[in-house]
Amino acid sequence: MNHGSDFLTHIRYEKRLSHHTLTAYANDLEQFTEFLHTECNVDQPERADFRHIRSWIVSLVEADLDKSSVNRKIATLRSFYGYLLRRKVIDQDPMAKIQALKASKKLPQYIEEKPMEALLDEVEFSDTFEGVRDKLVLELLYGTGIRLSELIGLKTVDVSLYDKTILVLGKRNKHRIVPLTQPLFELIQTYNRVKEAEFAGQADSTVLIVSDKGVAAYPVLIQRIVKRHLELVTTLEKKSPHVLRHSFATHLLNRGADLNAIKDLLGHSSLAATQIYTHTSLEQLKKTYDQAHPKAKK
């Protein structure tokens, strides 16, 4: 009996996790199972004990895997063995003595306001479907702070013509309403007209953002669009959709937005997740002080 497959089915239909999270869980279990086979001579993960799990974690750390990634894998195993324990497949939890690594808190990377303004206001986008679509992708990610998965999940009907908002389906199947600026709202309308003309009504009309073939956009497509355009204005090593989300939150905070309001816009479940942007804002304040105060460099 494949308990790993049963577990993945369980979390897929009962926990209702995102496709991205499900893929991560499946990859973690596959990697752990392979380690058990090759390094521990254990044929099934339900036969692993504390020592085997600890050895795997040590091997991940020695391979210089990021601590947050190691902790995610630990969380995967904790969930997996908790499932086996509830199903009475095992009678002892091998994760009981396993603790998460203390991860160093990294400040979120973001793009300064001027480069973002240059990208969205000065870089010339073609008036073709691809050009309008690419600009809309960037404007939505930066203008609303939504996640990559949320952008891809946006439906055409989620855009409200009445109050100029979008309905976003976030983590844990929670909805939130995010306002649109007038220029962004108008860009969506322009995009819909260009999309209709490009595909003559044959594109997927249920989703907002579609690929060059008229089907629902996929993660790699959005990542390529973002990376290609961010390379024009920043030297940041990371050029991902999440950088635009970080930029959205940081710029709002720098301009005096209330932290609770930013929390709601980002779809965070608690204020603790949003507070990391206060550190970023503090770094910006220090930078401004060092550049402007007459005593700062003396």
Image (cartoon, rainbow, N blue to C red):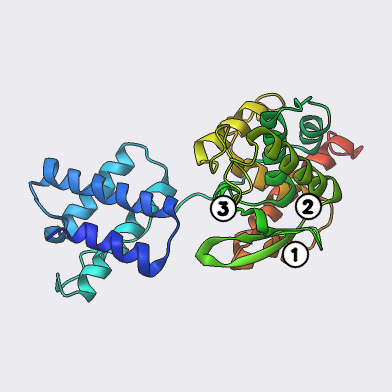
Residue type for callout 3: Gly
Identify which amino acid the numbered label 2 is placed on.
Answer: Leu
Locate the C terminus and report the quarter of the image it occupies.
top right
Q: Residues within 10 Å of mark 2 (few under 14, many from 20)?
A: some
Q: Which residue is mark 3?
A: 153
Q: Quadrant of the N terminus?
A: bottom left
Q: Which residue is mark 2?
A: 252
Find the distance from the CA under tag 2 to the CA under tag 1: 10 Å
Q: Pinpoint residue 92: horizontal percent, then vertical percent.
A: 17, 71
Q: Quadrant of residue 295?
A: top right
Residue 261, numbered circle: 1
Nearer to us of marks 2 and 3 is 3
Q: Does the CB distance between marks 2 and 1 fall below 8 Å?
A: yes
Query: Would residue 184 appear left or right of 15 to someone viewing this image?
Result: right
Badge 3 local density, few (<14 within 10 Å), some, or many (20+)?
A: many
Q: Amino acid at mark 1?
A: Ala
> Vertical placement of 218 versus 174: above or below?
above
> Are dots 3 and 1 in contact, CB under 8 Å?
no
Q: In 3D space, how far apart are the residues under numbered discs 3 and 1 (Cα atoms)? A: 23 Å
Compare residues 53 and 165 and report the one nearer the observer. Answer: 165
Q: Earlier in the sequence, mark 2 or mark 1?
A: 2
The residue positioned 75% from the left and 47% from the top of the image is 143
Residue in view at x 61 percent, y 63 percent: 268
Q: Is residue 218 left or right of residue 158?
A: left
Q: Residues within 10 Å of mark 1 (few under 14, many from 20)?
A: few
| Extreme residue toward the right, this view | 294
**Which image quarter: residue 271?**
bottom right
User: N-terminal of the two: label 3 or label 1?
Assistant: 3
User: SS of the residue at dot 1?
Assistant: helix
Q: Is residue 247 visible?
A: no
Give percent across and percent down for residue 3.
18, 61
